[in-house]
Amino acid sequence: MLRELFERKIQFNDILGLTVASLAPAGPQLAFAMRDELVGNFVHYRLHGGVISAALDTVGGLAVAVALAEKFPGDSAEEIAHRFNRVGTIDLRVDYLRPGQGKRFVATGRVIRLGGRIASLQMTLENEAGQMIATGAGSYVVS
Amino acid sequence: MLRELFERKIQFNDILGLTVASLAPAGPQLAFAMRDELVGNFVHYRLHGGVISAALDTVGGLAVAVALAEKFPGDSAEEIAHRFNRVGTIDLRVDYLRPGQGKRFVATGRVIRLGGRIASLQMTLENEAGQMIATGAGSYVVS
Amino acid sequence: MLRELFERKIQFNDILGLTVASLAPAGPQLAFAMRDELVGNFVHYRLHGGVISAALDTVGGLAVAVALAEKFPGDSAEEIAHRFNRVGTIDLRVDYLRPGQGKRFVATGRVIRLGGRIASLQMTLENEAGQMIATGAGSYVVS
Amino acid sequence: MLRELFERKIQFNDILGLTVASLAPAGPQLAFAMRDELVGNFVHYRLHGGVISAALDTVGGLAVAVALAEKFPGDSAEEIAHRFNRVGTIDLRVDYLRPGQGKRFVATGRVIRLGGRIASLQMTLENEAGQMIATGAGSYVVS
């Protein structure tokens, strides 16, 4: 259900071509393939910085959703969706380590702390060669 | 020339629908209209957080480019493009203040300090009603 | 009362030598003088980066406290202290713009948005010559 | 030599009581003991947020210094000191995860990427019970 939510129900995730690669609680993952539309550098064939930050922010939200589903195992699909709908990013940091070059990218989100009101996340973006393209950190309201 | 560079030559800016609204050195601006494709919340009609961060990061880069053009007034169009091509985001912070609701959004970038190697930026995103949707801060390499 | 709280009741503020310079709601200020103990660079006489971040974080908390006192004007001194005691920094960003040189420094905090649960702040640190030493942004829980 | 530099030659590190606990390149560490002077909360006995950010920023600088010493193994002690003197924090993020309670704290810095001009760091602060008090991320100029 989270998969469908993230891949189809959020328009911009569709534009980015994000697919849920893993819902493993330790580190949920989103993946996407390089496409012309995602390019940011007109000389080199590299991801736009905005695609990178979008992927990191989105996987952060996914990781929070998965962590909440784990914390409240009795929730129905409807309650999960409702709970996720109240998750919001407070702030986000992106560290751009290397140019976003590659064919396929995987964003991973790890919940560092899930509080009653705030969740603290760390995220990474790697290419298919395992190179670290970017890291991120974010604070999310979990309501 | 910067206008063409930002609006047409960078694919993802085209996806976002970013247009250069102002090249005023004190605060260059990019604008874009709300569209279904930019939505992030499947219940409410709001911008995806990734669209917000992308707009802030991009206007930061634009502001650096404008500041460099001001600092080196003798540069040819080619040198300006070359200099801009060496600008890269080191890191970015986005503060999500209010839901991204509105019809038209304006992102403004202000160079807080332009050093020989690093530029420090502050950015804002407002809707047509003047509501502050998000603020940002970023460090850019200016080579 | 807030003045006493910040200057005397918080040990580390005392170490830094922070004094409340202004409680103006638009931008409360803390000030401190340069001292050997605050030096971070053994070659040049400059503030330690940690003193800078401490001053920015503290003035952020002060600005939140002042904003809360404004929002709840009927509160007693005890309720103000109680409310402030529940304010906590979620995260903080510091941009180090210039070396911390000077005789006297002023940190200013501005509440960008005061929500029911979260406050978003922007802070600045200047020296007596009006030079911008550092800027900051922070998210605070206001409970 | 780095040990002496960090513990004795930087006044504010002395105030914080920072000692070099490890110079292991994978994750150099600084340690300090809880003291009344480091308290930030007048009701509970907890570290001031500024002490936390100071420790994280300082261990980030230490980690960069160690990484540079590793990268340039032929350097004399003087060259090492000279190279370190040109290291500067561009910006820093601190995520405050848990109240700073404990008897002894260890800050660890990990270089995520050491470029020719910029180093990207991640830092952590834990207490003696292994609880994660705070995490950090920072960008440093390595000149």
Image (spheres, coloured by chain):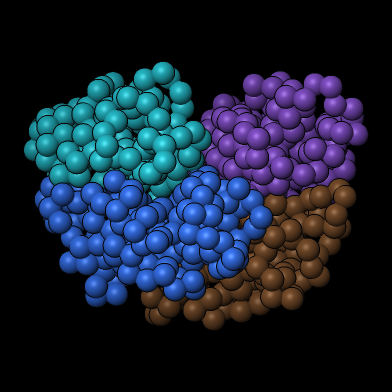
Chain colours: A brown, B purple, C cyan, D blue
Residue D33 falls in image quadrant: bottom left
**Which residue ends up furthest to the top in the rendered image?**
C129
State left or right for residue B127 relative to residue A101. left
Point 33% across, 40% down: residue: C39
Residue at 43% in and 78% down? A70
Place residue A133 in its image quadrant.
bottom right
Q: Quadrant of the N terminus of chain B?
A: top right
Q: Is residue D103 visible from the viewing direction of this image?
A: yes
Label total for image: 0
State the residue at coordinates (49%, 64%). D66
Q: Inspect this view and state whether residue A31 appears.
A: no
Point out residue D6 in the picture as x, y percentages from the top left corner: 36, 56
* Viewer-nearest residue: B15 or A132: A132
Percent coordinates x, y for residue B59 in the rendering: 68, 36
Residue at 51% x, 50% y is D82
How far from the left and from the top, in percent, is residue D53? 35, 51
- Which of the two residues, A115 or D123, is positioned nearer the viewer here? D123
Question: Residue C99, how many percent across, how many down?
Answer: 46, 35
Q: Quadrant of the C terminus of chain B?
A: top right
Name the foreground residue: C132 vs C1: C132
**Is A127 situated above or below D142?**
below
Of A94 and C12, the residue lying toward us: C12
Q: Quadrant of residue C106?
A: top left
